[in-house]
Amino acid sequence: MDLYVCVWGWVCWCFYVKSLQLLVICFNAFKNIVQSVS
């Protein structure tokens, strides 16, 4: 799971560089994944 979080975080960073709106969408999706796992 840690590796997946690391990769997902890297993808979020790429989104952040390109668009702040994409970062918000990515962050919300990431929160949902964390909640569903824990």
Image (cartoon, rainbow, N blue to C red):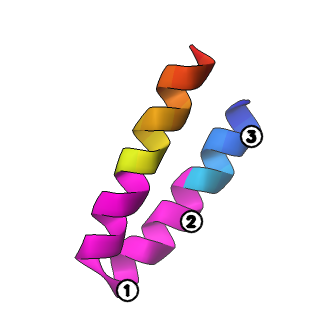
In primary-sequence order, the first of circles 3 and 1 is 3
Residue 14 in the image: state x and y as whole percent: 49, 75
Q: Which residue is mark 2?
A: 11
Q: Amino acid at mark 3?
A: Leu
Q: Please give the label number shown on residue 3.
A: 3
* Disc 3 element: helix
Q: Are marks 3 and 1 in contact (CB under 8 Å)?
A: no
Q: Are marks 2 and 1 in contact (CB under 8 Å)?
A: no
Residue 6 in the image: state x and y as whole percent: 63, 46
Residue that extends furthest to the bottom in the rendered view of this protein: 18
Among the 4 quarters of the image, the one containing residue 10: bottom right
* Disc 1 element: helix
Instruction: For marks 3 and 1, give the CA distance.
Output: 23 Å
Q: Amino acid at mark 1?
A: Lys
Q: Which residue is mark 1?
A: 18
In primary-sequence order, the first of circles 3 and 2 is 3
Among the 4 quarters of the image, the one containing residue 4: top right
Disc 3 crowd, CA 10 A, few/some/many (<14, 14-19, 20+)? few
Q: Please give the label number shown on residue 31.
A: none
- Numbered range of the magenta stretch: 9-27
Q: Residue at x 45, y 66 (%)?
A: 13
